[in-house]
Image (tube, rainbow, N blue to C red):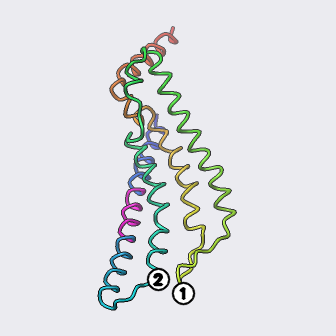
Amino acid sequence: MGLLHSLRRLSDAVNQLAILVCIACVLAMLGISFTAFVYKLFTGSTLSWTYSLARLFLPWIGFLSMTISLRYGEHVAMTLLVRSLPRLLTLVAAVFCLVAIGVFGALLLWYGWDYFQGTRQVYMVSDQIRVHGKFTAIVVPVSGAIILLHLVQGFALLEHFLDERDVIDELIETAESEERP
């Protein structure tokens, strides 16, 4: 259990880092937008680069917030369906959800890495500011890796299974006790 405990702690730490990065991205976007507002207020003209630069943070916010919501069980859930299932099917549904999340994370990692490596685009924010497309492309495989890391949290990722957690734990304990001589 030492390795699993360590991986869960790593998952929590990575989640906290993702939260900080999202906050930094939002603050950067607000700072850029505020700069544009103040510049327009004092000069009457606009800065051409502010909108283009600010929107480069949107993929980071979107993808990382997806991993954060997964970690806290705030994703789309079908609570009513799950609660209407028999006990054994509740466990099957939970496992299926975790497998589907794992497949999604693996696909983000696999295809996202290819996307990142193949990105050759450079965003021309202004004459002086150029941002390579890799800045936004790397968030796709990073998000996939975070999703896969969060899977070590197990059933705790599934908010709609938390009410059924006792049922799941009971089923697991029953299965384990039947395996023992």
Residue at the spot 46% in from the left edge and 15% down from the top edge: 88
Q: Callout 1: helix, strand or loop?
A: loop
Residue at the spot 50% in from the left edge and 11% down from the top edge: 180
Q: Earlier in the sequence, mark 2 or mark 1?
A: 2
Residue 147 in the image: above or below residue 81: below
What residue is pinned by disc 2? 48
Residue 132 in the image: above or below residue 178: below
Query: Which label sits on residue 37?
Result: none
Amino acid type of the residue tagged 2 in the rendering = Ser
Q: Decide if residue 110 is on the left or right side of residue 89.
A: right
The reply to whether the C-beta atoms of the residues labelled 2 and 1 are less than 8 Å apart is no
What residue is pinned by disc 1? 128
Residue at the spot 48% in from the left edge and 16% down from the top edge: 176
**Residue 91 point in image, percent of width and height:** 46, 21
Dividing the picture into quadrants, the one containing residue 16 is: bottom left
Dot 1, crowdedness within 10 Å: few (<14), some or many (≥20)?
few
Dividing the picture into quadrants, the one containing residue 115 is: bottom right
Q: Decide if residue 32 is on the left or right side of residue 110.
A: left
Residue 38 in the image: above or below residue 3: below
Q: Nearer the viewer, residue 168 or 29?
A: 29
**Residue 47 point in image, percent of width and height:** 43, 84
Q: Which residues are magenta?
A: 18-28
Report how far apart the C-alphas of labels 2 and 1 lie in the structure.
11 Å
Q: Callout 2: helix, strand or loop?
A: loop
Specify whether residue 6 is painted magenta: no
Q: Decide if residue 26 is on the left or right side of residue 178.
A: left
Q: Nearer the viewer, residue 14 or 103?
A: 103
